[in-house]
Image: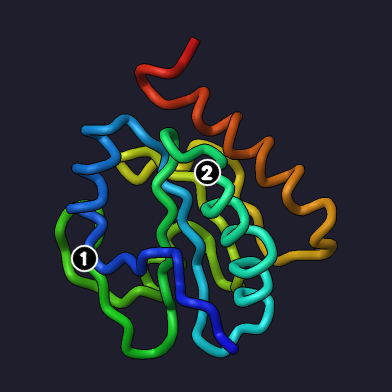
Amino acid sequence: MLSKPLIQRVRDFAELAKLAAYENRLILLLVSQQECPYCHLIKEEIIRPMILGGDFRDDILIRELFIDAGEKIRDFKGVEREAADFAHGYGVFVTPTLLFLGADGTELEKKMTGINTVEMYWHYLSQSIQDAISKLPEKAS
């Protein structure tokens, strides 16, 4: 039985940027593909429990970007483009990849590509989220 997706799919980064800026939140972007077993693993074993547990609830906006053929999005400047081309601009060529973005689309922390061990992944993800949050304009110390 497939569980209901908890991660919102993003198609308009210009709108997402407005929300992230208004709420001063980090954008945690999962770059994914429909038929990617490791993407499903990250969603079910890492991100789903994080959402259900309320971890970082007030600090991050979690979104998913599919880069399958034909997927189109509006980028941070409002320009329509291929989702894969948008991801390539961040050096993303492999799924799953997690990006830690500011409201202007700037990468605030080094991306996480792939998944080795689920047991350690949460630790690394949590640390990256905390480091990226500390770089947000009003949250920087």
How packed is label 2: few (under 14 Cα within 10 Å), some, or many (20 or more)?
few
Q: Mark 1 points at which residue?
A: 74
- Report the residue at 53% width, 60% height from top: 91
The vertical placement of 7 against 77, above or below, is below
- Report the residue at 61% width, 77% height from top: 40
Disc 2 versus disc 1: nearer the observer:
2
The vertical placement of 34 against 141, above or below, is below
Q: In this view, does 131 lie to the left or right of 27?
A: right
Q: Mark 2 points at which residue?
A: 54
Q: In this view, does 43 lie to the left or right of 63?
A: right
Residue type, label 1: Arg
Which quarter of the figure has residue 119?
bottom right
Which quarter of the figure has residue 26?
top left
Between the residue at mark 2 and the residue at mark 1, the CA separation in whole angstroms equals 29 Å
Outermost residue to the left: 78
Which quarter of the figure has residue 37?
bottom right
Q: In this view, does 66 lie to the left or right of 74?
A: right
- The kind of secondary structure element at disc 1 is strand
- Report the residue at 59% width, 63% height from top: 97
- The kind of secondary structure element at disc 2 is loop
- Report the residue at 60% width, 73% height from top: 95
